[in-house]
Amino acid sequence: MLQLNYSEFILETGTDEAGRGCLAGPVTAAAVILPANFENKILNDSKQLSEKVREQLKPIIEQQALCFAVTHLEPLVIDEINILNASIKAMQESILKLNPKPEYIIVDGNRFKPVLDIPHTCIVKGDAKFMSIAAASVLAKTYRDEYMNRIHEEFPMYNWKQNKGYPTKEHREAIRKYGTTKYHRMSFRLLPEQLKLNI
């Protein structure tokens, strides 16, 4: 059973990101403040939920949250500042959009940089322990999936609708065949043999 709060603060936000390991598309983060009376028996870490269940939870979270925000950071930014920094920046930007301003932040994972003067705690596997992080993980994942479905229409040969930009065999084959797009992360190892030198 997920816990509602980590701290004693009422305005505690959970934050999480989706798409860190992808070869294409943005890294997407969400931040959510849930009300003190929030209950949901289905809510869990988005990776444990089917796409159908995530889609069912999305409007429930959006309607019942005190506030929420989502941020997409594009591949150009990821390539410039690296994926870890981009993930943190996307979470920070989501938190800064929240109104009311949170009094405490709980972050999924083990790395974060402070936002304003708000105290924070990093929680490994936090999306499977706390409701607000789980809610953020669901929003980050569903918003990112929608984004990937949209850009799939532009470049259907990569089948982003299916693989969402992750390094599947099919996605890599398409990169080999068609090259890269503006949505690919050029700082990532897009093809396994990229590092081989022709000596």
Image (spheres, rainbow, N blue to C red):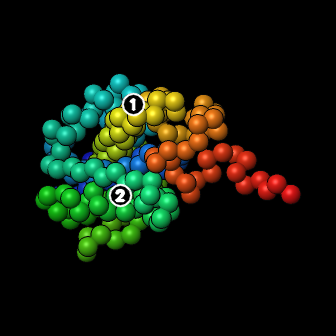
In the rendered picture of this protein, how many numbered marks are placed on residues? 2
**Residue at horizontal 34%, vertical 58%?**
91
* Secondary structure of the residue carrying numbered label 1: helix
Res 6 quadrant in image = bottom left
Residue sticking out furthest to the bottom = 117
Instruction: Look at mark 1 in the image and give the residue it sits on.
Output: 153
Closer to the camera: disc 1 or disc 2? 1
**Residue 56: % across, % down:** 27, 28
Kindly give the residue lying farthest to the top in the view shown.
52
| Residue for point 82% across, 54% down | 198
**Quadrant of image for the N terminus:** top left
Q: Are marks 1 and 2 in contact (CB under 8 Å)?
A: no
Q: Position of residue 165 (x, y in %)?
A: 49, 39
Q: Earlier in the sequence, mark 1 or mark 2?
A: 2
Q: Name the residue rendered at 37%, 49% in the picture.
A: 28
Categorize mark 2 by other alpha carbons within 10 Å: few (<14), some (14-19), many (20+): many
Q: At x 37% / y 63%, what residue is drawn?
A: 89
Q: Is 179 drawn above or below residue 109 in the view shown?
A: above
What's the distance in space between the residues labelled 1 and 2, CA to CA? Answer: 25 Å
Q: Tell me, yes or no, if residue 118 can be seen here.
A: yes
Mark identifier at residue 8: none
Residue 159 x, y percent position in the rendering: 50, 30
Q: Nearer the viewer, residue 55 or 181?
A: 181
Under circle 2, the secondary element is helix
Callout 2 amino acid: Ala
The image shows residue 81, relative to residue 44, as above or below, that is: below
Q: Quadrant of the C terminus?
A: bottom right
Provide residue 52's location: percent of width, then percent of height: 35, 24
Residue 140 in the image: above or below residue 149: below
Q: Amino acid at mark 1?
A: Glu
From the image, tell me which residue sits under label 2: 90
Q: Name the outermost residue toward the front.
A: 178
